[in-house]
Amino acid sequence: MTEPVLSIRKLTKRFGGLVAVDDVSWDVYPGEVVALLGDNGAGKSTLIKCVSGVYQPDEGEICFEGRLSHFARPMDARRQGIETIYQDLALANNLDVSANIFLGREAKKRYLAGLIRTLDEQMMLRESRAALESLAIQFPSLTQPIESLSGGQRQAVAIARAVYWDARLMIMDEPTNNLGVPEQHKVLELIRKLRDQGVPVILITHTLPDVFAVSDRLMVMRRGHKVTEKRTTETHTEELVQYMVGALDDTRVQ
Amino acid sequence: MARVEMKAVAEMAPAAQTLTPPKRFVLALSRSWAWAFLALMIVFFVVTVPIVSFGAVNFLTVRNSQNILVAITPILLLGLGQTFVIIAAGIDLSVGWVMSLASVLSALAIRAVFNAGLPLFPSVVVGFLAAVAGAGVVGFVNGVIIAKLKVPAFIVTLGSSFIVRGVALLMSENTTVIGLPPGIRAYGNDALVYFIRGEAGGLHFLAAPEVSGELLRRMDRILPYPVVLTAIIVAIAIFVLRKTQFGRHTYAIGGNVEAAIRTGIPVDRHIISLYILSSATAGIAGFLSTLRFTAGSAVIGDALLLSSIAAVIIGGVSLFGGAGSVMGTVIGALIIAVLTTGLVMLNVEAFWQFIVVGVVVIVAVLIDQSRDLIIGRATRGPPT
């Protein structure tokens, strides 16, 4: 078996008396889409925020690409190649597509020995176009403010940005929320495309049809524990619901 | 397959090209209304001013145009930094009083170093540095409290404007700072070009021709130094906002500060720089007023704060952040100055200026909002 890209070992995170994540171990392998399931308050967001550097675990460890990782800040995780796309997408709606793809990492041209530096708009536009093409995303215009784009298109911009900046693990939080049905399909299509390019994706969701549409494996959490981990083809909706509400639990002695 | 599907997504967007021709016309009008309004106003005054004065006065003369330029200089300088700050969804209410403080500081500095034996030009340079440094300190403190301690900008700059006002009045001992070397007048009033109309007239460059009486009355100063300096600063501001990373980050912070933070933009540092910038341009305005009147005044900027914010808003900068341009502020300031000058020349009582400017500000915002309605974008509410 190949080495896992991400390996979480016995991770625990507490907030005061509340144990949000309790002794969870989990591996994510290259080129797979894994779904992270659970009811509200199951601890999936907390677990993910430990991986993306928002929180620091109280116990346990996180290995990314075989190295033990300590992320003090989200920026540390991003530099290593862990990109998290939250529901608000972290896009500036008043800026255009290429400005958003390069947000915070703008390309610059230098004049007078670096004394004057201007934005290299052409280079950013060219690179953005290439990044979008690699994911087969087409927009009518890359120079319009993205507030005129639909929710699915904005999701696509956020994904293209992560891919352009060399994401080696993509975490997506409820990516199909608030989208119309046709747009949900496009986003799922993009997730498959990421997998085909070898980028593993962690999909946090409550939407079971999405899980069956794109994921290879899944993990269900309940009250901070991992209650099961399965191949998607080996389970079905009803069983997953039973895991999510606590009727089934693999860790419990039957 | 996927390519075709994504194309379908793209077509679902309510893009501008799907608008009907009448809507497109209204949209184009709403984008350039400020220019149109400025042009209409000039035409109006060109027609009415000679009528009211029975042909004795014309609106569009060299002298009047220069008067208008001199009048907008302080409004524009206060509005420039403000444009950056408001695009980043902030506000700086302290600029008027910072200008006053800078005027007093530069007057005191020039007087002190000149009396200590420094030649005129270096004294003026020291005055400039004192004005900008003093103003910059205020901006730095504002910025740190806003960015690091997360106090709303409105409150911080409201508070600091009272403090700055008090400091300016204390330093000037509540009186005009006089006793400055008379030579500094030239820096604040001389022009690049002098033009004497009519007989024995002509153009003179850089140095004022030594004339008196009739000839002096016929002499116009074209492009006084403060106007030239302001124009250079405006050009730099346009460049910075449109072409540099600093400008891009300013828009990003105003558009979505959360996104700016998460994409690694040094937001706190940027916000502090913006308030320093805003104060510094106000400081330059104060310095120029000291040169122009050969005196420092602790109240010179009081009335200018609201005019400068009005110019920024008429120019299309959104108070909710993320949108606007330096050119817009320039037009806004021009509209205010043309309006004020024209109404005076029509012998309209001065108080009407306030009423008219107030109406223009509100109409400007209404026009911007109607644009949002047309392109089907939700008009942004106040930041939460």
Image: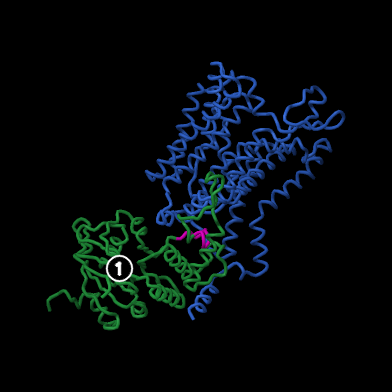
Chain colours: A green, B blue
Q: Amino acid at mark 1?
A: Val
| Left or right: B212 as drawn, with respect to A217 | right
Q: Residue furthest right?
A: B199
User: Which sits in the foreground, A167 or B26?
Assistant: A167
Where does residue B341 sit, x and y in percent of width and height? 70, 38
Badge 1: chain ID: A
The residue that mark 1 highlights is A5
- When the figure is inspected, residue B347 is found, relative to residue A103, above or below; the finding is above
Q: Residue shown at 62%/27% (left/top)? A: B291
Q: Main secondary structure of the magenta part?
A: loop
Q: In the visual, does A235 lie left or right of B90? A: left
Q: In the image, is residue A60 part of the stretch drawn in magenta?
A: no
Could you tell me residue A119's position as x and y percent? 54, 53
Vertical order, B326 against B68 (above or below)? below
Residue B272: quadrant of the picture: top left
Q: Residue at x 48, y 59 (%)?
A: A102
Residue at screen point 69% across, 42% down: B338
- Rendered residue at 22%/75% (across/down): A228
Part of the protein shown in magenta: A91-99
Which corner quadrant holds the C terminus of chain B?
A: bottom left
Residue B295: x, y in percent?
A: 59, 24
Disc 1 element: loop
Name above or below for residue B160 compared with residue B371: above
